Amino acid sequence: MTGTSSPVREGSVHATPLMRTVVTTDMEQDDLASLIRYLLYTNELDTVGIVYTSSRFHWAGDGAGTTFFLPGREYGTPQTSWRWTGVRTIQDQVLPAYAKVVKNLQDHDRNYPSPERLASLIAVGNIAFEGEMASDTPGSDLIRDLLLDDDSRPLYLQAWGGTNTIARALRSIEERFSGTAEWTAVRAAVSAKAVILASGFQDETYAGYIAPHWPRIRVTDLSGGYATWGYNCDDGRGNTRGDLFGGAWLRRNIQIGPLGSLYRSWLDGQAMAGDPLDVFGDPEAAAGGWCKPLAPYDFLSEGDTAVFHPLLDTGLRDPSDPSLGGWGGQARQVSTEPNLWRLVPVDSTTRWATAAQYDFAARMRWTLAPSGSGAYPPRVRILGGSGTVAPGGSVVLKSEVTGRRVALRWWQYREEGTFPGAVTLSARSDDRVTVTIPAEARPGQTVSIILEGTADGRHPLTRYDRVILNIG
C-alpha cells in the first residue's frame, strides 16, 4: 500500500484535507434523519462508500424462511426477518430529492458530489441476520478493497448499524493473507488505516471478531452522543433539548424544500416502508410505544449524527486524537488492546448542539437558492501560544478572523487540559487575550484555550481554533 496525497477539492469553502469515509447503515428513521444532515456536509468529506448493513434492530432474513433468535432481543421469538426497511430508501427517496437541490448546493460550494456519484458508492453489505458475517458481499468487498488500496489516508468506517459488514471485510483480508509472508505487513497497514466510528455496538461482531483479531484498529464508541442526538421521548417534561429541537423551529428551518421535507420528526405522518414498528408518525400507535410522543414535529432522533461530526471541519477537528473535543464529543481511551475509546459524559456533545443546529439550518437554506442569499461560517485562527508558559506566567494570544460581523469569545476547555484548575483570561480587546497560569500549576501539565467566532445573522454560524499551552 503506497501513499497518495490528501486532496482538497477546488471551489470548496473548506481548505483543509478531506476525510475519507464510508457510511454503513441499517437505514431506519433516525439513520434517515442523520443522512439528510450528512448529505449537507458531503462537500467537506470524501465519501467513498454507502453500505446497507444489518443490526440487532433491523435485519432482512435470508429469503429462504430461516428463523433467527438471540435472547434479550425485542422480538422475543424466532423471526424470519425483523423491521427491515429494504435496500432502496437512499436510491429511491433520498437521492432523487438531493438531485433536485444539488445545483443550488454546488453554487454555494462546487465540492458537493453529484447524485450519480453518490449512487455509484452504494452497495449492499451483510444484511441477512444480526451479526451475519459468514459470506462476502458487495458491501464488504467495497470496504475490503478500500482498506487494501494505495490511498494512505485513514479510512473512517462509520457504523450507523452493526459492525458486521466491516467485520466481514476484515475477515476477508485475514483469510486472504493469513499464513502468507505478507500477513504481518498487511495486518499492520490495515490496522493503521482503518478507524471505526460506531454508533454503539449494535451486534456482537466487534467483541466477537474485530477486538480479538484486529486489536490495534482504533474504535470509538459514540453512543454517548445519544444524550444529544438519540431518541427524544416524552418523559413528562416535554422537549428538554431546547427551542432548536422543537417542532416550530424544525418546521421553519429544517423540514423545508425537497430534501428537508424527508427529515423525520415526531408525529410527522411519515413512515419507513417495511418497518411495522415505526409508529413515530402515527399519534395513536406512538401513544402505546416504548418512546412516548412529544408534540408534533419535535425532534425525533439522529442517533448517528455524532458518528460523522468528528470528521467535520469546524476548526477543532483532529481525528487522530479522540481526546480532543468538538462537535462529535470528547473521548477517553478505555483500553489499548483492543484500542477502544468511549465518549465522556453528556455535555461532551450537548455543549456544541446549538452551533450544530444553526449550521444545519443554514445549509438547508443553501438547498433552496443559489449563493448570494446564504450564510457562511467565519474562519478564526489563534496567533501565538507556542512554547511553554511557566507557573505564574502569562502569554498573549491574538486572533485572525475571516468573515463579517464576527463576535469572538475566548474560553478555557478544562476537560481537554491536564491542569485541573482555572486560568485567568484577561481580554485586552476582542481580538486578543492574556492567559495567566496559576502559580500552583506543575511543569508538564497542559491548558486548552478555545477561540470561538460566531458570525451574526439569521443563523449564527460558529467556527473555532484551539491552542494547547504547555506548562514548563
Image (tube, rainbow, N blue to C red):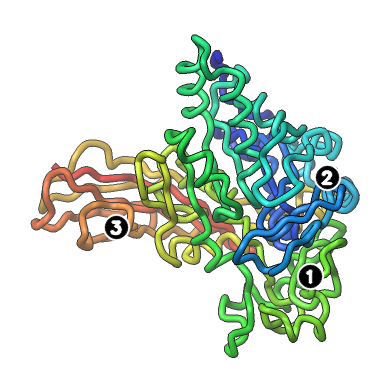
- Identify which amino acid the numbered label 2 is placed on: Val
Q: State left or right for residue 149 relative to residue 372.
A: left
- Asked if 72 appears above or below 138 in the picture, the reply is below
Q: Residue at x 12, y 45 (%)?
A: 443
Say which quarter of the image contains residue 33. Answer: bottom right
Q: Secondary structure at mark 2?
A: helix
Residue 379 visible in this rendered orientation of the protein: no
Q: Residue at x 82, y 86 (%)?
A: 284
Q: Residue at x 76, y 50 (%)?
A: 372
| Sequence-earlier tag: 2 or 3 | 2
- Identify which amino acid the numbered label 1 is placed on: Asp
Q: CA distance from mark 2 to mark 1?
A: 29 Å
- In this view, the mark in front (2 or 3): 2
Say which quarter of the image contains residue 14. Answer: top right
| Sequence-earlier tag: 3 or 1 | 1
- Identify which amino acid the numbered label 3 is placed on: Arg
Q: Position of residue 171 (x, y in %)?
A: 60, 30
The residue tagged 1 is 278
Q: Position of residue 126 (x, y in %)?
A: 73, 42
Q: Residue at x 62, y 38 (%)?
A: 166
Q: Secondary structure at mark 1?
A: loop
- Figure label count: 3
The residue tagged 3 is 428
- In this view, the mark in front (2 or 1): 1
> Pointer 2 and pointer 3: residues touching (CB < 8 Å)?
no
Q: CA distance from mark 3 to mark 1?
A: 55 Å
Question: How would you rate the neighbour count of disc 3 (Cα within 10 Å): few for under 14, some for 14-19, many for 20 or more?
Answer: few
- In this view, the mark in front (3 or 1): 1
Quarter of the figure that contains the C terminus = top left
The residue tagged 2 is 102
Q: Position of residue 332 (x, y in %)?
A: 37, 51
Quarter of the figure that contains the N terminus = top right
